[in-house]
Amino acid sequence: MLVGAATIATAVAQMSLPTMKVSGKDFRYYQVGDKESIHGVSQKSGIAVEDIVAANPSAATGLVKKQLLLFPVTPVNPQATVPASMNVTATTAQNYTLGAGENLYTVAKKFNASVEGLLSSNIKLSPDEFTECAKIKVVPNSAMPFYYETTDVKFHNHTIQNNETFSSIANLYGTDQLTLQKLNPAVDKLKKGKTIVVPRTSKVRVMGTMESVSMSDLEAYYRPRVGDIHFKLVEEQRNSVYNVGIILPFQLQKADAPKQAYLYTDFLKGFMIAIDSVGKQASRKINVKVYDTQHNLNVTDSLLALPEMQELNFIVAPGEPKQLERINAFGKEHGIQVLNCFTTKNEDYKTNPNVLLVNTPTPTLVKNLTQWVCDRFAGCEVVYLEDASSDASEMFNLIKSNFTQASIKGTTLKVDGELSAEKVSRVLNPGTNYLFVPSNGSKALLKKIVPALKTTKADRFDCDMNLLGFPEYILHLKDYQSDLMTIDTYMFSRFFNAKGFRTRNVEASYSKWYGGTMLDSYPHMGLFGFDTGMLVLKTLGQGIDIDENTEVQKGIQTGFKFNRIDGCEGLINQAVTLVHFSPDKKIESFVTTDK
């Protein structure tokens, strides 16, 4: 109701403004007085600041005396100037990659978007960085009428003086002799006292639209000013405040809270350490607000009803199904990004553009894994090790299907009891690279296949062998890490902690701040909170949205690279962590993503 009332109030306020026509369209306008600020105009006109800026993007960088602020009486046709291949609306940001010869001004003209709006939406790019292959966000049909300078030509009569020629008169008026002769075709000879028609050009300030302005006028007007505009936008963003809400069921009111509540608390502690680590690196002020849902849907609804919730720009949401569903819907309604860190079961990301899913869905994970295998083991053959005593896992079946679609050759070995080295060796041909893929990640199957793979690895020096390890192998490292190294194993996972110096630094900070050690879990919730905090605070703190253009982030335990996939409106984390247990006793991890 509050939002609706605000919208109606703005509309009523606009009705009190006079109207004018610009390029055939009706606009209500307000002329800025001497030393008026945007807040002063808002109070005087009754139009909200955000509505003024939305209709007049240049107002975000300050107002000038006699500037006209325009508000459309009739909405602009959202399809008017958009390429037919793009189905967009005037309020939806689109991703766009600049082609050869394109720049800030050609894109503004192409999409009917304001120069100020493009700079603001892509604040990390300087005006000169809008070049070929640059990836940007653009809101088509978002440009409002604006002032610019153009060349005005008027004609008047010139009285000829002694010794004047077409050439000297042309120089006097900044034109050329041929132009004068064409304008005066009946004049063969110049005589004193006679008159001829001459053009007089001058720069005039006019109001037009992105549709009507010529490319030359657009560039000529903005190029001398665009550096200052960008600087002011950067400064404004540095002084802006970005609100991040962490809404999780900490259940602080319970004397004996369940383990899940303590894990969420450890996540928060890790996030808070990230705040300390980022510190003054952030150019934008970020407020982090923490809320306890108490694992109660009624409490969640009460929190979302608070007026301050609509001021949030970003929410870290819980994994509880109903609570997450409510928060996702709230984010969609109010344009707030929601980070789903804790579950893949909720599928709101398919229809909600504001949802960011951290835990990569299995089909996407396997798709990206397949691409990596095709790149890393080009021309290899796969040996599927199918456990006869248990069903193949869903992950294995999906891998096998994807590998088949990618035309990777495969052979199946049934594992009934302990696998023999002789059985393995029989399917190997000299000079071939083999990748062994077990049918599940269980410790029982690992125990059956390890001896044979180790022996074959040592004996069959005439071919290459590697083992593809499942995420569950993390749980078996205590007993099998050395064996995995001998076999030369690549394990894929959503989470992996190499326990290097970065881990030790966070553990030291945790002990200093909170005492004791982080809870032992998989994934490690304290480190998960730290990685998530670093992603959120470093990216948003630089004034950059978390979207498809955000670079790959390799955390201590978790990698992040968000993209949209076909059929989904939200963003999905595409990062897959590959861990190499190499024969030289090293453990190396790296992140691969979709292409």
Image (cartoon, rainbow, N blue to C red):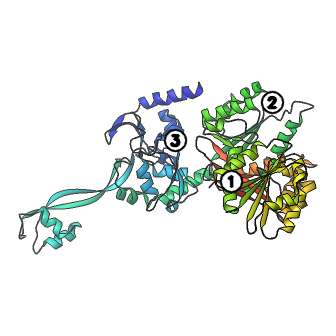
Residue holding disc 1: 370
Inter-mark Cα distance, 1 to 2: 39 Å
Mark 1: secondary structure: helix
Residue 227: % across, % down: 50, 60
Mark 3: secondary structure: loop
Classify the position of the N terminus by image quarter.
Answer: top right
- Asked if residue 175 can be seen in this view, the reply is yes
The answer to the question of whether label 3 and label 1 lie on touching residues, with beta carbons closer than 8 A, is no
The type of residue carrying mark 3 is Thr
Mark 2: secondary structure: loop
The image quarter in which residue 505 lies: bottom right
Between marks 3 and 1 in the image, the one whose residue lies nearer the viewer: 1
Between marks 1 and 2 in the image, the one whose residue lies nearer the viewer: 1
Residue 86: % across, % down: 46, 45
Q: Nearer the viewer, residue 265 or 307?
A: 265
Residue holding disc 2: 295
Inter-mark Cα distance, 3 to 1: 33 Å
Q: Which mark is residue 92?
A: 3
Residue 316 lies left or right of residue 206; in this view the side is right
Q: Nearer the viewer, residue 329 or 60?
A: 329
Q: Residue at x 16, y 73 (%)?
A: 167
- The earlier-in-sequence mark between 1 and 2 is 2
Crowdedness near tag 1: few (<14), some (14–19) or many (≥20) residues, C-alpha within 10 Å:
many
Classify the position of the C terminus by image quarter.
Answer: bottom right
The image quarter in which residue 388 lies: top right
